[in-house]
Amino acid sequence: MEWIQKEIYISNKIRGFHLITDEILFNLPELTKIKKGILQVFIKHTSASLTINENADSTVRSDFEAHFNEMVPENQPYYQHTIEGLDDMPAHLKSSILGSSIQAPITGGSLNLGTWQGIYLCEHRNHSDSRKLVLTAWGEGYQ
Amino acid sequence: MEWIQKEIYISNKIRGFHLITDEILFNLPELTKIKKGILQVFIKHTSASLTINENADSTVRSDFEAHFNEMVPENQPYYQHTIEGLDDMPAHLKSSILGSSIQAPITGGSLNLGTWQGIYLCEHRNHSDSRKLVLTAWGEGYQ
Amino acid sequence: MEWIQKEIYISNKIRGFHLITDEILFNLPELTKIKKGILQVFIKHTSASLTINENADSTVRSDFEAHFNEMVPENQPYYQHTIEGLDDMPAHLKSSILGSSIQAPITGGSLNLGTWQGIYLCEHRNHSDSRKLVLTAWGEGYQ
């Protein structure tokens, strides 16, 4: 049984959806030790989130930003939590709709995503610091 | 390798979003045995859900209720599943949008959430009984 | 410690929400070996998704299709990623809102879902091939 766990920082990004698969994998050379297992990526924030989606055409990511701004608009009359800025309450909502973690299988020493899948960091604030992630991988090792 | 699994009941709550982090942790004194691992909280219902979000200002939680009622309204003309009440079909939809489980890292014997993160029980029905959760934690132990 | 991992294909389905619990379990006779554990079902695509919801009345599943088409409409003026068809960009968005995996507890050799819970394959494209899933189960075994 192999266990890998580390915290990493992702440098601050502009509001929107960003592919971070390569950055995650760069931090996990130990995945090669795992024959069958799972990787979890967890974000320790409530105004940014993680999801898995299309890794090729950048307009998919800009359309995500456009649609989430429609589905979870700023300035709704029913928002009471407004002291941290117009973008704050929508950021919390988007974060729960998309989720604070992704889990994906590890097979034969590699992350077993589909050909067109990548990991997105979804930055919902206009301005943010770097974001802290916890990477946890576990599985049956080669011996 | 440590494995902890138990079923607990959360007493019935009014419709809305409720912080249950302390109640979860109260039921898991065994987490101190886990050096690196994962906690899953799973809800055995389809009209209530779980998510991770801001643990401080209660208006965040009331804004969640307000926004989810806008995004998934009652009384839509296209609903066919209406026999269990106006709040039932929206409850099923909200439940899948938010999800029936949360997974979070355990590090050094504690749940490794961000400073502002807490676990929400999201009660989508007007009236419900207590809700049954399955808590499962696993990880590398101290020996 | 038990580890089970396999890839399966789900034959192509019409656009909509489909119960696949029985098909998943049919492929996992080895679950009986796990006393306490977790099953993950992961979909290797970005225009179909997985969720857990009500397993009885089929109108719940048709109402899911109707509501998701309202909440994530086709033909929005802000979509730029349109070359793969009107249903493509909404499919990507629905896929991230619902998620690309489900995780559920295994207890006493069986999947520990609530009475009314089932696993849905959510097909968001008008036409698709079969969908590839990775099933991964791990847990404490009986010895």
Image (cartoon, coloured by chain):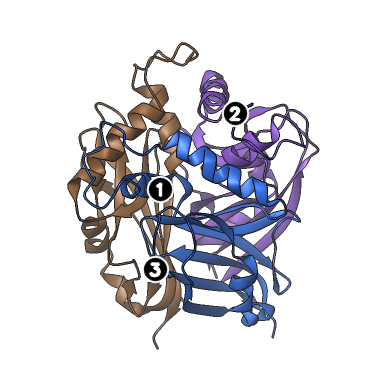
Chain colours: A brown, B purple, C blue
The mark nearer the N terminus, 1 or 3, is 1
Question: At label 2, which amino acid type do we have?
Answer: Gln
Neighbourhood count class around disc 2 (C-alpha, 10 Å): few under 14, some 14–19, many 20 upward:
some
Q: Residue at x 66, y 47 (%)?
A: C59
When asked about the image quadrant of residue C140, the answer is bottom right
Give coordinates of residue C83: x percent, y percent.
Answer: 21, 50
When asked about the image quadrant of residue C107, the answer is bottom right
Q: Which mark is residue C129?
A: 3
Pinpoint the chain carrying mark 2.
B
Asked which secondary structure carries label 3, the reply is loop
Q: Are marks 1 and 2 on the same chain?
A: no
Q: Are marks 1 and 3 on the same chain?
A: yes
| Count of all numbered marks drawn on residues in the image | 3
- Is residue B115 in view? no
Judged left or right of residue B123, residue A112 is left
Question: At label 1, which amino acid type do we have?
Answer: Ser
Give the residue at mark 2.
B76
C38 versus A142 height, above or below? above
Give the residue at mark 1.
C96
Give coordinates of residue A38: x percent, y percent.
Answer: 44, 67
- Is residue A137 in view? yes
